[in-house]
Image (cartoon, rainbow, N blue to C red):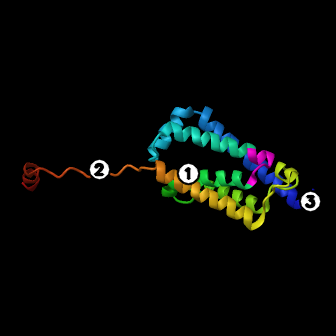
């Protein structure tokens, strides 16, 4: 195993564990599925319970695939897509820094995933054992392309942000009272 294989393995293991933990937290953590669903609904996503379960399955599934080094560009695409949705809907309005609920963390996970898709899963992977490892520009294209299409599809299908309700126009009587 050379240095590149060790780096790929380290990235896969850490990213895989992080994604599994994230998915388990959405499922079994503080608010459980109901709390995650309320949070997603608050972000403007319709069908919060479905969104919560889709998130759990995607995060845990991507994590397991990364740990195994199986379908690595697609597992990376799943991570990137989840992070794009989180970054766009939950973190972007808060700026960059994670301590202010910004997008720093999700950006880092997405870029690490993209780098892993380019690097490939390494020799200690099921992709390598099956002879199906995809690396370089092909891994980059698959991971980023699938992630962008999946994110756009999810947002187009489910995202319906609340429009601010305009303040009611003051009645003529109130305008007269304020004028006096």
Label 3: few (<14), some or many (≥20) within 10 Å?
Answer: few
Query: In what element is the residue under mark 3?
Result: loop
Q: Earlier in the sequence, mark 1 or mark 2?
A: 1
Q: Residue at x 35, y 51 (%)?
A: 163
Label 2: few (<14), some or many (≥20) within 10 Å?
Answer: few
Q: Residue at x 70, y 53 (%)?
A: 74
Q: Earlier in the sequence, mark 3 or mark 2?
A: 3
Left or right: 77, with 49 as reference point = right
- The C terminus lies in quadrant: bottom left
Q: Which residues are magenta?
A: 65-72
Image mark for residue 86? 1
Q: Earlier in the sequence, mark 1 or mark 3?
A: 3
**Dots 3 and 2: beta carbons under 8 Å?**
no
The quadrant holding residue 108 is: bottom right
Left or right: 19, with 44 as reference point = right
Q: Horizontal and vertical percent for residue 28?
A: 62, 32
Image mark for residue 165? 2
Q: Is residue 70 visible?
A: yes
What residue sits right under mark 3 in the picture?
2
């Amino acid at each position: 195993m050379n240095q590149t294989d060790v780096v790929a393995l380290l990235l896969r293991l850490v990213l895989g564990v992080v994604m599994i933990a994230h998915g388990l937290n959405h499922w079994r953590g503080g608010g459980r599925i109901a709390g995650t669903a309320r949070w997603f609904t608050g972000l403007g996503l319709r069908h919060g319970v479905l969104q919560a379960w889709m998130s759990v399955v995607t995060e845990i599934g991507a994590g397991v695939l990364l740990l195994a080094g199986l379908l690595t560009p697609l597992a990376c695409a799943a991570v990137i897509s989840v992070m794009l949705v989180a970054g766009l809907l939950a973190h972007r309005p808060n700026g960059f820094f994670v301590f202010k609920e910004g997008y720093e963390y999700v950006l880092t996970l997405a870029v690490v995933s993209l780098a892993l898709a380019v690097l490939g899963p390494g020799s200690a992977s099921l992709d390598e054992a099956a002879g199906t490892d995809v690396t370089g520009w092909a891994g980059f294209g698959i991971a980023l392309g699938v992630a962008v299409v999946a994110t756009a599809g999810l947002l187009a299908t489910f995202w319906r942000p609340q429009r601010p309700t305009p303040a009611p126009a003051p009645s003529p009587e109130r305008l007269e009272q304020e004028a006096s």
